[in-house]
Image (spheres, rainbow, N blue to C red):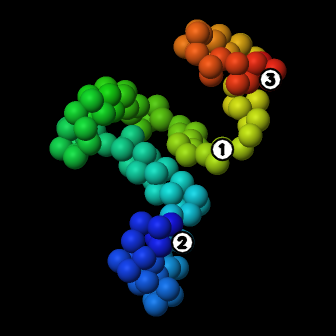
Amino acid sequence: MASFIDDEKYAKPLREDPQKLNNVLQYSSFKHMKEVVNKAMDDLFKMTPEEIMKTNLPDQMKKTFSKVEKKEDSEASSPPSVNFIRKGIVGDWRNHLSEDQSKRMDQKFAERTKGTEIENYWKEYM
């Protein structure tokens, strides 16, 4: 990809410096991105509304996250582990959606694609 974008500017430095290539591979890996995003979200959920408003998040996100109710330490149990990024696998929706959610998704898809070619692409699978 680096060669496609600009061989001299991007690909050549990666070929000449193995550490740069290793950094690209490490920091663009699914594992690394998942760790970074989950830590950032954990940190965000621990912030007070005042701290959230001082961040450089977009205004709508600030409003949304500042409204999340925080429990007092005495009430709070350890929060469940939440993954904000998951590796998409064909058919994996079955592990994440209930039967009702799946039906609603199919209905919404049919509504939104009605009258287009897209509605026929997956007809045999729905």
Residue 19 in view in this figure? no
- Image height of 87 relative to 1, above or below: above
- In whole angstroms, how far apart are the C-alphas of marks 3 and 2? 36 Å
- Amino acid type at image mark 3: Tyr
Marks 1 and 2: CB-CB under 8 Å? no
Disc 1 secondary structure class: loop
What label sits on residue 88 in the rendered view?
Answer: 1
Q: Which amino acid, mark 2?
A: Leu
Instruction: Name which residue lies at 54% across and 72% down.
Output: 25
Quadrant in which the C terminus is drawn: top right
Q: Earlier in the sequence, mark 3 or mark 2?
A: 2
- Direction from residue 34 to residue 12 in the image, left or right: left
Give me the disc on residue 25.
Answer: 2
Q: Position of residue 101 (x, y in %)?
A: 67, 17
- Residue 32 seen: yes
Residue 125 circle label: 3
